[in-house]
Amino acid sequence: MARRFCAACGRESEVLIKGLCPECFTTRVGGAKGTPSRFRVTVCRFCGRVKRGTRWVEAGSFPAAVDVAVGMLIERLKPVEPLEGVELERWEPLSEPDWRTRVLIRLSLSYKGVAIPYTIDTHIELEPSICPLCEIRQSGEYDTLVQVRGASSVDVRREVEKALEHASVWDALIEVIESRDGIDVYFTHRGAASKFVKALTRARQASISRTRHEIVGTNRSGKTRTRKTITVRLK
Ligand SMILES: [Zn+2]
Ligand SMILES: [Zn+2]
């Protein structure tokens, strides 16, 4: 096979991309489009979860939050033609992980099946905010929380959707929040919550494993306000 040389640096290279060696191609033409000089993500300052699309993803520490952010950033990158694919090799912090972290992201692009390394140097900025769950917890403005749990074989999300549809208690529904353990459904009043629980347990085998009352203060007329938590386990 004929020996091939880079048109820019003159070095011999087995892979030439538009006449350039991978290094010259990525420095002169680029590697991935859409690389920002800083990338912002929203983080709940109470629980540390990161907002990813419409969901809040568990993080819990600065490095974990930066890791989620790096994943989000990479999804937005597009390889510069004729390169293909953008994959994360690893990232490393160039400053102590914090609200603003300088990171070096090592990517792997590909050209005709050959891996082409490409590095991004950027800042990840975490914007403190409050997630819906912490907002509810902080304000205490819910009356009943139904925690729906199930074995891994159970599609808890689907069951909750069906039960909500069936119970038709939208007026009293505050929020449906997916957590690591299952799904939490917040209601403004008890009647609606019990309708929902009934719909849930009618549809499939379930047990109400725990009911808990908690005093949260007094209302305007001086009566004690309580909050109720019901845990339903689907079988
Ligand atoms: Zn070169
Ligand atoms: Zn939160």
Image (cartoon, rainbow, N blue to C red):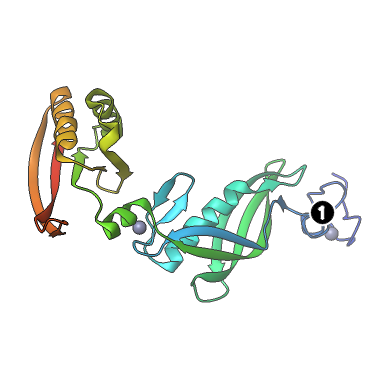
Q: Residue at 8%, 50% (x, y): give it.
A: 212
Q: Is residue 232 above or below residue 138?
A: above
In the image, is 6 to the left or to the right of 74? right
- Tell how many labels: 1
Q: Residue at 9%, 57% (x, y): give it.
A: 224
Question: Which image quadrant for residue 113?
Answer: top right
The spot of residue 157 in percent (x, y) is 30, 34
Q: Residue at 26%, 32% (x, y): give it.
A: 160
The spot of residue 5 in percent (x, y) is 88, 54
Q: Residues within 10 Å of mark 1 (few under 14, many from 20)?
A: few
Q: Nearer the viewer, residue 64 or 100?
A: 100
In the image, is 44 to the left or to the right of 228? right
Within the displayed image, which quadrant is ligand 2 positioned in? bottom left
Question: Does the closest atom of ligand 1 sit within 8 Å of the Cβ of label 1?
Answer: no
**Residue bearing the label numbered 1:** 29
In the image, is 100 to the left or to the right of 134? right
Q: Quadrant of the C terminus?
A: top left
One can see residue 235 in this view: no
The spot of residue 41 in percent (x, y) is 52, 58
Q: Nearer the viewer, residue 97 or 13?
A: 97
Q: Residue at 12%, 55% (x, y): give it.
A: 221
* Amino acid at the residue labelled 1: Val
Residue located farthest toward the front when viewing the structure as drawn: 221
Q: Secondary structure at mark 1?
A: loop
In the image, is 137 to the left or to the right of 29? left
Q: Quadrant of the N terminus?
A: top right
One can see residue 228 in this view: yes
The spot of residue 176 in percent (x, y) is 31, 41
Residue located farthest toward the bottom when viewing the structure as drawn: 96
Question: Which image quadrant for residue 121?
Answer: bottom right
Q: Nearer the viewer, residue 234 or 89?
A: 234
